Amino acid sequence: MTARPIAAVAVLVGGVALACSTAPSDARFVATPPDETSFAPVALMLIQACGTLDCHGTVGRNLRLYGNTGLRLRPGDVPTALTATTNDEIEQDYMSVVGLEPEAMSAVVASGGADPERLTLVRKARGTEAHKGGAPFLSPDDKEGVRDECLTSWLSGKTDPSPCTRALMQP
């Protein structure tokens, strides 16, 4: 064999070895999501704005929201405004929201909520990215922008339940 084929084989073997290696444990990503304990008012707002059975209150969505007026977590529970959303449903909603884009969400949280538009959830809700359901945070019912304020306050680490409550009062 001449030097060129030997070099080519060496490069090929080295490439295969690198492709099969794993990342060092200190290089793995560890998510830092927003606080789960302050998520309940945000969850209730999201359930109302986005969690109906024809939207994110269905099993086939990346963002799946469980709640009293849409998809229920327990098979025997019926969608109705006469019952409350359960704590288990709010916990599942939290996992769904923070699991969408963990790296982007961690960056937004680390920055104190700066540039929430990094998140597809925010862009679609605001209507800056195509969304089959339109722009629920820009609806005529939400003239004050309280839905957006509710979500972004949670992302900043300073959850303000007041806009979340005001959002729930809207039709």
Image (tube, rainbow, N blue to C red):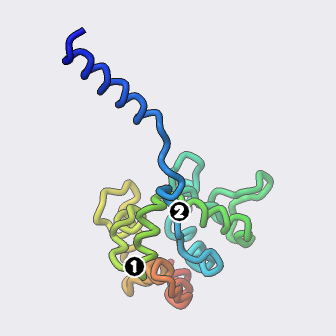
Q: Residue at x 37, y 63 (%)?
A: 124
Q: Nearer the viewer, residue 162 or 101?
A: 101
Image quadrant assignment for residue 152: bottom left
Name the kind of residue labelled 2 in the image: Val
In the rendered view, does 132 fall on the left or right side of 99? left
Do we see residue 141 in this rendering? no
Callout 1: SS: loop
Residue tagged by mark 1? 111
Q: Position of residue 107 (x, y in %)?
A: 41, 70
Name the kind of residue labelled 1 in the image: Ser
Q: Residue furthest right?
A: 76
Q: Which badge, 2 or 1, is on the more N-terminal residue? A: 2
Q: Is residue 160 above or below residue 64?
A: below
Determine which of the numbered discs, if any, sits on residue 30 in the image. Answer: 2
Q: Position of residue 2 (x, y in %)?
A: 20, 11
**How many marks overall?**
2
Mark 2 or mark 1, whichever is nearer to me: 2
Q: Residue at x 50, y 83 (%)?
A: 157
Structural distance between the alpha carbons of marks 2 and 1: 16 Å
